[in-house]
Amino acid sequence: MHLYDSTIPSGNAYKVQLLLAHLKISYQTTSLNIVATPSETRTESFLKLNPNGRIPVLVLDDGTPLAESNAILFYLAEETPFLPSDRLARAQVLQWLFFEQYSHEPYLAVWKFQTYWGDISRLAESEVKKLKEKGQAAIDVMERHLEGREWFVSEQFSIADVALYAYTCAAEAVGFSVGENVRAWLARVESVEGHVRIRKDPTGKCPL
Ligand SMILES: N[C@@H](CCC(=O)N[C@@H](CS)C(=O)NCC(=O)O)C(=O)O
């Protein structure tokens, strides 16, 4: 398998790297410069892999490209302990994957990007307010769901946890407030055997 990720640490690529590490699957990597203008994800050859021009893309051994981080997680986790076999539990995993993409990542990922590699002073005040409020709201949803629970679905570590961990692990560092349930869950994810940290930022802008 071949994973297209980015030179700067991307949480969306990290999800895939984290699951591949847990699954002990070896793979090759091409890291694209997404802060170049234009981004290296917008070349003709990369757009053939993902017409949406974004990493991560996993190219399977038969050459088929698969884009969208959570779709890649779902593909890799099939018939492994990281995706429950029960019908409702699988739908609940999807519930959290969709939550992550609609209510969480658009705020936490963008805020993290702007904090370390962007220029917050160039953002409109209303945009800053939206990113902060909606990002915090997503973390608060997680905090409430984790009350009395160890994991997001079925009391087992699954790709729902992997997907949500990727940006939540940086939440406090970029100024969000993290409650005790989320804090304990972050530590739990990090203690699962096979856990790997997100890659270091070669530009040195992100200290995580
Ligand atoms: N929904 C997509 C989002 C992917 C995404 O936003 N990728 C960013 C890096 S985290 C990217 O490729 N940015 C480069 C660009 O937009 O040109 C996923 O989950 O994979």
Image (cartoon, rainbow, N blue to C red):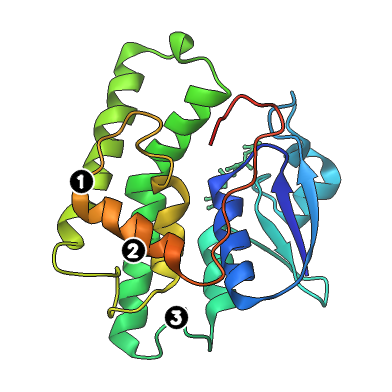
Residue 179 numbered mark, or none: 1
Q: Name the residue type under label 1.
A: Gly
Instruction: Look at 83% across and 43% down and name the residue there.
Output: 44
Q: Are marks 1 and 2 in contact (CB under 8 Å)?
A: no
Crowding near the residue tagged with mark 3, few <14, some 14–19, many ≥20 C-alpha atoms within 10 Å: many
> Looking at the image, which is closer to me, 53 or 29?
29
Q: Name the residue type under label 2.
A: Trp
How many dots with numbers?
Answer: 3
Please give the residue where the numbered disc 2 appears in the rendered image.
96
Q: CA distance from mark 1 to mark 2?
A: 19 Å
Q: Against 36, is 106 above or below?
A: below
Quarter of the figure that contains the N terminus = bottom right
Residue 206 position in % (x across, y down): 57, 29
Identify the mark nearer the N-term, 1 or 2.
Answer: 2
Residue 23 position in % (x across, y down): 61, 77
> Looking at the image, which is closer to me, 94 or 207?
207
Residue 13 position in % (x across, y down): 61, 52
The image quadrant that residue 118 belongs to is top right
Q: Name the residue type under label 3.
A: Leu
Mark 1 secondary-structure assignment: loop
Along the horizontal axis of the image, is 64 left or right of 101? right
Q: CA distance from mark 3 to mark 2?
A: 12 Å
Identify the mark nearer the N-term, 3 or 2.
Answer: 3
Instruction: Look at 35% across and 21% down and name the residue there.
Output: 127
Q: Against 104, is 26 above or below?
A: below
Q: Quadrant of ligand 1?
A: top right
> Looking at the image, which is closer to me, 105 or 67?
105
Identify the mark nearer the N-term, 3 or 1.
Answer: 3
Please give the residue where the numbered disc 3 appears in the rendered image.
83
